[in-house]
Structure formats: C-alpha cells, structure tokens
Amino acid sequence: DCEVFSLSLPLPPLFEQEQIVEELERKLSRLEKMEGNFRTMAETAAQASRSVLTGTFCSLDAPIFKLSELENMGRIQLGRGRIISRRDLLEKPGNYPVYSSAATGDGLFGKYGEYMFDDTRITWSIDGGGRFFLRKGGERYSVTNVCGWIKVLDESMIVPDYLYHALYSRWLQKTFDYIHKAHPSVIRKEYEIPLPPLWDQKQIVEELEWKLLRLAKVEQVAREAVAVCAQARRAVLAEAF
C-alpha cells in the first residue's frame, strides 16, 4: 500500500508568480556567483599552500640525504605502531588519542586508556595515503600498526619540524595506494631531503609556517563563506514562499 501525502502550496495570481520567480532567480544567481568565487578562493589558497611547500624545498642548495642514510647515521629512527582495534578502545576507554591510517583530518582513530609516546614524532599512513603528520611532544598518544613513525635522535643536526615539512612537501608530489604501500622499508628509500645547517632549518620553518598559517586562514574564511551562501540560499527560498 502506498501512503499518500498532501502538500499545500500558496498559489498567487500568475503575474505575481512571474514576479516571485524573477526576483528569486536574481537573488539565487547572485548567491551562486558569490559561492563560486569563495570556492575558487579556498581552492586557490590550498593550491598556494602546496606551491609554497614544494617550492621551499625544491630550491634549497643543501646536501641531499635519503631517510635510510640518516637512519644509518643514527640521526633518526623509523618504526611502526601496533595493533589497536576498536574492541581495545571499548575495553580500555580513556582520553589518549590513537592515530591510524586516515589521511583526512589529523588521522584520529579514537581515544584509549593507554599511550605509546609522549615525545615529538612524525607519523604517516602506511595503507593508502602515506600522508605525514607532526605529533608534538607533550601529547600522549598511540599509533596503530597501519602507521609508521619517525623520531629525530639528533636534534643538533635535524629540526623535527623541518623534517616534517620537507617530507610533507615530497609527499605532495608522490602517490601511494593500497597496492603501493608506504611501509617503513619503502619510505627509507623513497624519500630524500635537503639538509642545510641547523640555523637555516629553523629560519625556513619559521618563515614557512608563517606563510602557511596566513594561507590556512584565507582558506578557512573562504570555506566558511561558502557555508554561509548555502544557508542564505535556503533562507531566500523559505522567504519567497
């Protein structure tokens, strides 16, 4: 059996209908144009961030090191997380974040009652994306078995934030999928970075993060404006009828 719904609509004279449609389409057209401009602004800011990252490290005149070389020199250490299932999260609840293979957001998988690390490390997704994240010291957290991690052992040679940005800029130019996985054994050979003196690394990080922060604010404001346009469209339609 089909349930019948009744819907009541206002039906003014034909001339008024034409006026309403004309005014409505004028307003919606303006909103659509504004929304398109804000979308373009957000995409432009995101693209500019990628260009700033890749451009910064492509133009550096400094010795190039593979991750495997830095590891063999004792400058960094690579590892992998351990299995933490959703059942584990339920059986041992807590407030310590667990990061997994998600390449969106900050890779958060859930919260746990235990933690693995409380120092600064770079983590990345092994399955799929391969994106890098910087986990700052002071936060207690864990990473699952589909995450790898890098710890800087010699901060007199490598600034962790610099290493993160350098790796992220290289990642933007690469592709990992569920066949070509970003295992530690793979990225040891896959990634190489320029390594200038420590003072230069600190300056590069300071200038780069300043630029990225400004571009991120532009992108955020533009995306919020897109959402406002969508709300305004609904309000215009509601008011019209």
Image (cartoon, grey):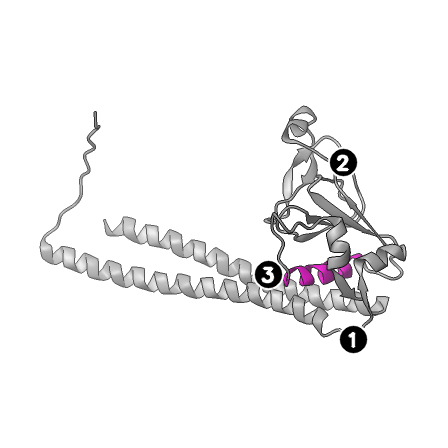
Give coordinates of residue 4: x percent, y percent.
Answer: 19, 30
Give coordinates of residue 77: x percent, y percent.
Answer: 83, 50
Comparing labels 3 and 2, the label whose residue is closer to the camera: 2
Indicate the secondary structure of the residue bearing disc 2: loop
Give coordinates of residue 189: x percent, y percent.
Answer: 76, 58
Quarter of the rendering containing residue 18? bottom left
Left or right: where does residue 130 sit relative to residue 117? left
Indicate the secondary structure of the residue bearing disc 3: helix
Task: Look at the numbered discs 3 and 2 and tell me whether their residues touch, using CB distance below 8 Å.
Answer: no
Q: Which numbered dot is residue 61? A: 1
Q: As rendered, which of 25 and 116 lies closer to the eye?
A: 116
Task: Look at the numbered discs 2 and 1 and tell me whether their residues touch, using CB distance below 8 Å.
Answer: no
Residue carrying label 2: 115
What amino acid is found at the position of numbered circle 3 in the picture?
A: Ala
Give coordinates of residue 130: x percent, y percent.
Answer: 66, 52
Q: Which numbered dot is residue 216? A: 3
Asked if residue 115 shows in the view, the reply is yes
- Asked if residue 238 is positioned above or below residue 203 in the image, the reply reads above
Q: Residue at x 69, y 51 (%)?
A: 182
